[in-house]
Image: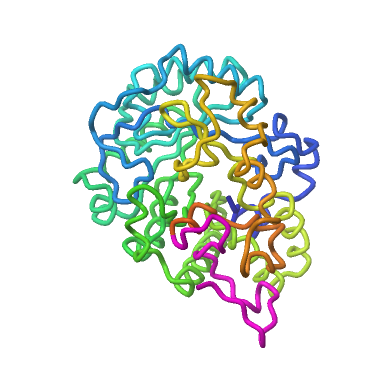
Amino acid sequence: MIGISKLYCGTVEPSDALRYGRDSKALPSHLLQFSKDKKPVVVWNVGQRCNLKCVHCYSQSKDIEYPNELSTKEAKTMLDGLAEYGAPVILFSGGEPLMREDLMELIAYARDKGLRAVISTNGTLITEEKAETLKAFGLSYVGISLDGLRETNDKFRGIEGAFDDALQGIRNCMKVGIKVGLRFTINKRNAQDIPGIFELIEKEKIPRVCFYHLVYSGRGSRLIEEDLSHEETRRVVDLIIDKTKEAHDRGNKIEVLTVDNHADGPYIYQRMLKEDPKRAAEVLKLLKWNEGNSSGKGLACVSWDGSVHADQFWREYTFGNVRERKFGEIWDDTSNPLLAKLKDKKHHVTGRCSKCKWLDICGGNFRARAEAYYGDIWEPDPACYLTDEEIGLLVDEPLTVK
C-alpha cells in the first residue's frame, strides 16, 4: 500500500509515525504501514457468497450457499486469537460480507476485543437502515468497490444498476458519519475512467480512494492479457499522482493510495528526486519503513473455512487452520518452509528482483502474480514496470524478465 497523498503531497512526515514509537497497536490507521513490528493486518473472508458477478473476483464468488464456513462460535474463537496475538486490524471481506447474518455481532465482538474493525464491500446492500446499524456497531470505516463509472462498473460487476446502488451505499454511510473509501482495480477496461473517478470523489466529498493494481488470482487470473502494459502503468501512476496533487492544490486533501504493486514506491521517489530533492529524502525514509509487499509477514488472510494464507489472493498455500490452532501459533510457525521464506523474501527472489537496488523498499512485490505468470513463486513480479536502469542493473548487461 503506497500512500500517494502521504508521500507525494506531504500529508505524512516521518515524525508523525515516530510520535507513536512506530508500534502497530498505538499507530493510527493511516500510519499503520510504517509500523516497525509488522503485526499482520488480517483479511478475513467471512463467507464466499456474493450478490454480484465481478470478472476479477479472487474468491470466484457466486450468489449461492457455500458449505464449511466458520460458525459464529468458531469465528469468535478466531477473533480471540487475533486479539491475543496483537493483530491491529481485522478487515471483514468476502464474497460480500454483508450477506453474512451474524456480521454485526462479530464486528461488535472484534471491537470489544480491541481490534480495529473495517469492512470491504461492494456497497450495494448498504441501505439507510444498514448504514445506521453499521454505525451503531462501531464500524468507523467502509471500503466500497467501484471499478469505473456507471457503464464500465456495471459491465465489470456483471449486474446492471450496481454502480447506482453502490453510490447510494456510499452516500448512506457518509450521512451517518462513517468514513468511506473507494476501491478501484485498474485494468484495460477501466483505466480511462480514472479522471472521472477523481471528479466523482470530489463531487461526493468522499475522503479516500485506493487504486488497486490487478492481481492474477481467482477469476482475475483470466485477465492477465487485460492488465496494463508497463508503459500504460507508468502513465496511470503519473495520472493518479497528478490528479491527487491538483485536488490538494484546490484544498481538497483527499487520501489517495495505490495498492498491490510496490514498484510504485521507487517510482514516486524517483519522480520526487527530480522535483523536490528535500521532500524525496523524507519519502525514502517512509518507504524504507513501509518495506513493500508484506504478504506472509505484515499481511495475512483467514479464509471462510478457517485456513490461514499469506494474503487473500494466494489460496493455493495454507499454513494451518484456526479451527485447529490459534492464529499466532500458525503465523509464527516457521517450520513451514514457504512461510519462513515469505518473512524474509529478499533472500529468495530470483532474476532482476534479486539484483534490484529497491528490494528493501519493494519487498519483492507480489509472489502470487509471479507464480501465476511464470509458474515459479520466486521469479520477478511481471507487473514491475521499472526499467533495468531504474533498478540499478548495468545498461550494457541487461537482465530482464522473460
Residue 35 vs residue 228: left or right?
Answer: right
Which residue ends up furthest to the top in the rendered image? 73
Judged from this view, the residue extending furthest toward the bottom is 396
Q: Quadrant of residue 36?
A: top right
Q: Residue at x 72, y 69 (%)?
A: 276
Q: Is residue 217 above or below residue 356?
A: above
Rendered view: 290 above or below 179: below
Q: Is residue 325 magenta?
A: no
Q: Residue at x 24, y 50 (%)?
A: 154
Task: State the image coordinates of residue 235 (x, y, percent, origin top left).
Answer: 48, 71
Task: Name the residue nearer the viewer: 188 or 177.
Answer: 188
Q: Nearer the viewer, residue 11 or 62?
A: 62
What main secondary structure does the magenta stretch of the protein show?
loop
Would you place residue 373 above or below residue 106 in this image? below
Q: Position of residue 147 (x, y in %)?
A: 35, 52
Please name whichever residue, 249 or 112, is drawn nearer the observer in this view of the structure: 112
Residue 377 belongs to magenta span: yes
Q: How many marks?
A: 0
Side of 270 where 232 appears, left or right: left
**Image coords of residue 179 (percent x, y):** 49, 35
Query: What's the magenta region?
Result: 373-402
Judged left or right of residue 268, residue 110 is: left
Q: Please, which colouring scheme is shown?
A: rainbow
Residue 272 against residue 137 in the figure, above or below: below
Q: Residue at x 65, y 44 (%)?
A: 33
Q: Residue 167, image x and y in percent?
A: 32, 42
